[in-house]
Image (tube, rainbow, N blue to C red):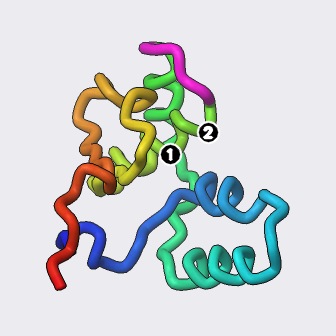
Amino acid sequence: MHSIIDDIPKISVITKIEVLRFNTTPESYRILQDFVSESIILDLNGIVVDNTISICKSRKIKLPDAIIAATAFVNDITLITRNISDFKGINGLKLLNPWDLPAKQA
């Protein structure tokens, strides 16, 4: 599909919380749990916290989004999101909207 998407997922601890906090069907929750358990969870650290503060001071952004952006930036990974507009303009942050990728050929 795409080399970034084919890698083992790396997600912020905030993403883990956001994904697993929703009430959903047992089957959907199991799928989400499987995704999270197969992912590398990137915890908060001092560098991520400092970058989060800088991002929040430079633009209007929700705190969870700022933490997710800072986590991606600090770990030099591409942030995959359909919500590009909330993250656009953050210097050095690599973004990818998975819906913009070409369809996989059979």
**Image spot of residue 39 (x, y percent):** 49, 77
Main secondary structure type of the part rendered in magenta:
loop
Question: 91 or 30, which is in the foreground?
Answer: 30
Q: Which residue is drawn at 53% across and 57% down?
A: 12
Say which mark, if any, is on residue 68.
1
Highlighted magenta segment, given as a residue range = 58-62
**Image spot of residue 31 (x, y percent):** 63, 81
Report the amino acid beneath label 1.
Answer: Ile
The answer to whether one can see residue 47 in this image is: no
Q: Mark 2 points at which residue?
A: 64
Q: Residue at x 17, y 61 (%)?
A: 102
Q: Is label 1 in a helix, a strand or a loop?
A: helix
Q: Is residue 103 left or right of residue 46?
A: left
Question: 25 or 8, which is in the foreground?
Answer: 25
Report the amino acid beneath label 2.
Answer: Pro
Marks 2 and 1 close (CB-CB < 8 Å): yes
Q: Is residue 59 magenta?
A: yes
Which quadrant would residue 10 be assigned to in this image?
bottom left
Which quadrant would residue 2 be assigned to in this image?
bottom left
Q: Does the magenta stretch include residue 105?
A: no
- Mark pair 2, 1: CA separation: 6 Å
Q: Is residue 15 left or right of residue 89?
A: right
The answer to whether one can see residue 55 in this image is: yes
Q: In this view, does 38 lie above or below 93?
A: below
**Image spot of residue 20 (x, y percent):** 73, 64
Q: In this view, does 84 lie above or below 78?
A: above
Question: 95 or 52, which is in the foreground?
Answer: 95
